[in-house]
Image (cartoon, grey):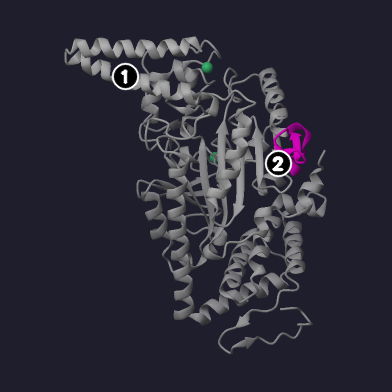
Amino acid sequence: MMRFSTLLKHPADWMIGSDEAHSAVITSRIRLARNLRGHPFPGWAKKGERAAILDIIRPAVEDLAPMKDGFSRELSELSSLQKQVLVERHLISREHAARTDGSGAVIERRQSLSIMLNEEDHLRMQSIRPGLQLTEAYEALNDLDSELEQKLDYAFDPHWGYLTTCPTNLGTGMRASAMLHLPALVLSDQIGQVLQAVNKIGLAVRGLYGEGTESLGNLYQISNQSTLGESEEAIIRRLERVISQVASHEQNAREKLMEDDPDMVADKIGRAYGVLRHAFLIDSKEALNYLSLLRLGGNLGFFAKETVNLCDSLLMDIQQAHLQLHAGMKLSPEHRDSIRAEILRSRLQSLDSPYNFSSGHKADRPDSGDQPD
Amino acid sequence: MKCDYCDNKATVFLTQLAEGQMKKVCLCESCAKERGVTDPTGFSMAEMLLGNFQKTVSGAVEPQGSVKFMGSGKICPECGFSMEDLQKVRRFGCANCYKVFANELAPMLRGMHKGTTHLGKVPVGLIETHYRQLRIEELQQKLEQAISSESYEDAAGIRDEIRKLDETEVAE
Ligand SMILES: [Zn+2]
Ligand SMILES: [Zn+2]
């Protein structure tokens, strides 16, 4: 049986890939909801019924080819910290983490596929990929689903499609989404306009963290709202088109910023670098915002390209539960800020100072050793 | 900043764009949890985004523009879920509930999705049944049209066709 620590030892597959053409798109994600015929939905099922359902679906899911050497647990077997870490890794939902008996999670070794058992629906499966890869993510999940439908008696109606606990998921039972990093659209004040346009064509947009149109870390999520009356392919095609448009708006905004006000951009990125490299106390808000700028710097050539992936995994690793797991104990907010700063300093230790575009060579660094380029 | 739903301090902030309007929602941790909006891609986000929740004077959260269902007392024979439960949680008890509460479902779906008929994936084992079922639905509509336009000969023909399709289903 795969251990929790083994699961987390390696970064998830999606953290190490990249999509040059759509550098603003961090991840693509597909989720499918499925239920069994003849059994009450999890929220309505009594304790014994939930256990019985789990006994049917868990072996079927564990037997799927990609899951055979994966991680599988009943939620009651996990500590609340472990569950929280899985939430921060986007492997289970926050709602699911609150569950105990009769619910479970099965996660592929590479963390690109995961299945929640007895969440709001009997099965909630997820596929996650780096960059703009909704089609690829869907294909991987669709294969899994087709294999499962041979073993499980799915609740399906010719008219309504896949029957789900909540009618907002009826039909395909599919939610497709992408996480986007849009710092230049925020800096150039175009974000509201772009998001409004996206929403107008029936897609949902939200800031990942934060308040108002300004989102901490400049991270935004675009997803489909409608699940009925369109095929999976049609939903994905529309979403992909819109997402690549938003990504190219972001790209244009970046180029324009560099053209119009390169000093402002360099200053912001340089300050972010300075703080992240040298802070001893940093709260998550500050860290998110500076990591966003550092990531932008990686995209714009201020830092080596790998910096982008480094930022993406740091976004994950500086969250509360990850910090506590790292420290091996419960942490007070102040202590958290100090551990967060420590992790940032050590992971960014070998990052060269930003490339100096105005003088055409690297800025002098008193502490630069023989770091490889 | 205070939670939109109670007096606690808000920690979860969402921006939703509904019908071209930017709406800000501020929630405390427990209200967010209750509404299932803490997970950024959570399925229940759709509900929030569709603006289905609104604060009432009493502070309780009620579905906005809630459809009042007529004739209570209906209960799903397979899982015991009642019309009152549906009214309360806006979710179903089991797959069979979709048959039992078909009339209540239609107004709930209004404006929620692109269409009202599934056009996506069909489980392999159900493909034949699926298309036969859709054909029957189509014929039943034609039958009604034929009857209302008093073309009884056509109606008889359509009825035969439906009966044949029904029989193949039973024979399986
Ligand atoms: Zn509250
Ligand atoms: Zn039922």
Quick check: A34 left or right of B52? Answer: right
What residue is drawn where x is 49% and y is 18%? B97
Does mark 2 have its CB less than 8 Å from ligand 2?
Answer: no
| Circles 2 and 1: CB atoms closer than 8 Å | no
The residue stretch that appears in magenta: A63-82
Q: Which mark is residue A66?
A: 2
Q: Quadrant of residue A149?
A: top right
The residue type indicated by label 1 comes to Leu
Report, in whole angstroms, how far the alpha carbon at label 2 lies from the one at label 1.
44 Å
Does label 1 lie on the same chain as label 2? no
What residue is drawn where x is 52% and y is 65%? A183
What residue is drawn where x is 55% and y is 64%? A23
- Whether residue A36 is situated above or below residue A254 in the rendered picture: above
**Dot 1 alpha-carbon crowd within 10 angstroms: few under 14, some 14 to 19, many 20 or more:** some
Residue B21: image location, x then y, percent: 36, 49
The residue type indicated by label 2 comes to Pro
Quick check: B155 left or right of B56? Answer: left
Residue B69: image location, x then y, percent: 38, 19
Q: Which mark is residue B139?
A: 1
Does mark 1 have its CB less than 8 Å from ligand 2?
Answer: no
